[in-house]
């Protein structure tokens, strides 16, 4: 196994991932395919639980679709041959060709087509934490930022008309702002907006319908203006099926990555015949909004590790508290405290190694654990705790009060 961490800056997520034991890469498994440890998987699950709960509250229907599909599906969507160079080679199965999916939208469209729909059902928000696979050149693979396998917090919103699409784009932007704000990213400081436009003259790259492009770009422009934020407009960065809003996030080096997107699609409804029945009983063509809320889980973890230098907020920390008995005679009480925290679903560990307290504290701080609980004679006698947090020290706090404090901090997703 290798960590890619040699010679990297202290803040680099690849170095932090190795030092904190979060993920590894294996040449035997393959380049660009991260293997997540128990601790790294905890961070992922917390992000996934957070965004699924928030999206569900906002009316998204979370679904599950396969990681591969027949090549014909991507020919139908038009992704093939547009993205052929970044798709894995077809797999021959029962005289048919299948591919690992590079995106989710065709699967969601097939779900939509599985039953007829009325205007009363729209907008229909279909979401998924989708595993995607893209063949990236080995020279551009970069830790978790650019991988060959990743999980995208993806969604496709089926809309009845441009007015409904505008409202849904605004809602998607609001969700992104809430999500990244919860993670500690600030508008202007950490991320900015870009309106990515198509090139009408490029008939090979972009679908030819000037009127549709003009309308779609104006809707996204109106949505951005409603956010009251500055944004830039960039030519020739759109998807082949329509313009998009890119949320550009700065990494620890000050470099920008496209982390979240909202896309207006007027092409796929034609290719998949995505229709609905209007109030007069007439068949109408829908509009699709593609959006990612917290983007790729892998890339978001990389951004978070670098932003917080590995010291993640309590709700995301793989280990939230560690119990440190000073000597062997303190182990029994330490184990009791440990059990009480675990019973409250607090991610706690206990260090029973025959080491000095100073060394135990050093190890815990190197692991970026938010709370260090010291158990000695005084704590045993009083049945109170001495706790060292990242910003303050808590003396003579009861186990119950400490537990309550942690649970409140976790629930509020307080930032350090």
Image (spheres, rainbow, N blue to C red):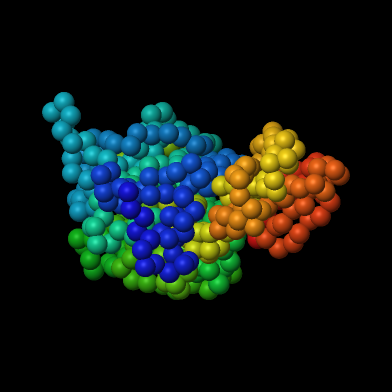
Could you tell whether 355 is left or right of 121 in the image? right
Residue at the (33%, 71%) spot, across then down? 235
Could you tell whether 314 is left or right of 163 in the image? right
Residue 282 in the image: state x and y as whole percent: 42, 36
Residue 283 in the image: state x and y as whole percent: 40, 37
**Toward the viewer: 80 or 51?**
51
Residue at the (16%, 26%) spot, across then down? 94
Quarter of the view holding residue 244:
bottom left
Residue found at the far right of this picture: 382
Image quadrant occupied by the C terminus: bottom right
Residue 405 in the image: state x and y as whole percent: 76, 48
Residue 393 showing in the rendered view? yes
Residue at the (53%, 73%) spot, across then down? 230
**Toward the viewer: 406 or 45?**
406
Residue 271 showing in the rendered view? no
**Toward the viewer: 122 or 62?**
62
Please tell me whether residue 322 is drawn above or below residue 219 in the rendered image.
Answer: above
**Toward the viewer: 220 or 370?**
370
Label tally: 0
Please tell me whether residue 115 is drawn above or below residue 178 in the rendered image.
Answer: above
Residue 333 in the image: state x and y as whole percent: 75, 38
Residue at the (23%, 57%) spot, across then down? 137
């Amino acid at each position: 196994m290798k960590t890619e961490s040699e010679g990297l800056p202290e803040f680099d997520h690849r170095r932090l991932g190795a030092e904190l034991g979060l993920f590894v890469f294996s040449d035997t498994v393959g380049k660009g395919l991260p293997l997540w440890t128990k601790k790294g998987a905890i961070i992922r699950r917390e992000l996934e639980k957070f965004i699924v709960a928030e999206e569900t509250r906002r009316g998204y229907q979370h679904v599950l679709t396969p990681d591969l599909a027949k090549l014909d599906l991507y020919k139908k969507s038009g992704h093939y041959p547009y993205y052929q160079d970044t798709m894995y080679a077809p797999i021959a199965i029962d005289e048919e060709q299948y591919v690992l999916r590079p995106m989710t939208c065709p699967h969601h469209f097939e779900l939509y087509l599985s039953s007829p729909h009325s205007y009363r059902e729209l907008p229909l928000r279909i979401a998924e934490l989708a595993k995607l696979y893209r063949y990236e050149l080995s020279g551009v693979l970069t830790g978790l930022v650019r991988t060959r396998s990743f999980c995208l917090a993806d969604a496709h919103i089926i809309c009845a008309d441009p007015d409904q699409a505008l409202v849904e784009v605004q809602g998607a932007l609001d969700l992104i702002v809430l999500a990244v704000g919860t993670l500690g990213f600030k508008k202007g400081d950490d991320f900015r907006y870009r309106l990515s436009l198509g090139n009408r003259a490029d008939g090979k790259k972009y679908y030819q319908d000037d009127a549709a492009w003009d309308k779609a770009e104006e809707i996204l422009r109106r949505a951005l203006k409603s956010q009251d934020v500055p944004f830039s407009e960039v030519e020739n960065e759109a998807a082949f099926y329509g313009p998009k809003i890119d949320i550009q996030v700065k990494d620890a080096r000050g470099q920008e990555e496209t982390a979240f997107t909202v896309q207006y699609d007027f092409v796929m409804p034609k290719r998949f015949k995505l229709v609905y029945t209007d109030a007069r009983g007439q068949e109408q063509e829908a509009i699709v909004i593609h959006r990612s809320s917290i983007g790729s889980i892998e890339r978001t973890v990389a951004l978070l590790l670098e932003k917080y230098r590995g010291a993640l907020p309590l709700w995301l920390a793989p280990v939230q508290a560690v119990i440190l008995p000073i000597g062997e005679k303190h182990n029994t009480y330490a184990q009791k405290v440990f059990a009480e925290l675990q019973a409250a679903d607090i991610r706690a560990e206990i260090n029973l190694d025959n080491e000095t307290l100073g060394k135990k504290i050093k190890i815990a701080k190197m692991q970026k654990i938010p709370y260090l609980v010291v158990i000695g004679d005084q704590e045993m006698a009083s049945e109170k705790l001495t706790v060292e947090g990242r910003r303050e020290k808590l003396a003579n706090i009861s186990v119950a009060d400490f537990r309550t404090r942690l649970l409140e901090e976790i629930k509020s997703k307080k930032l350090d």
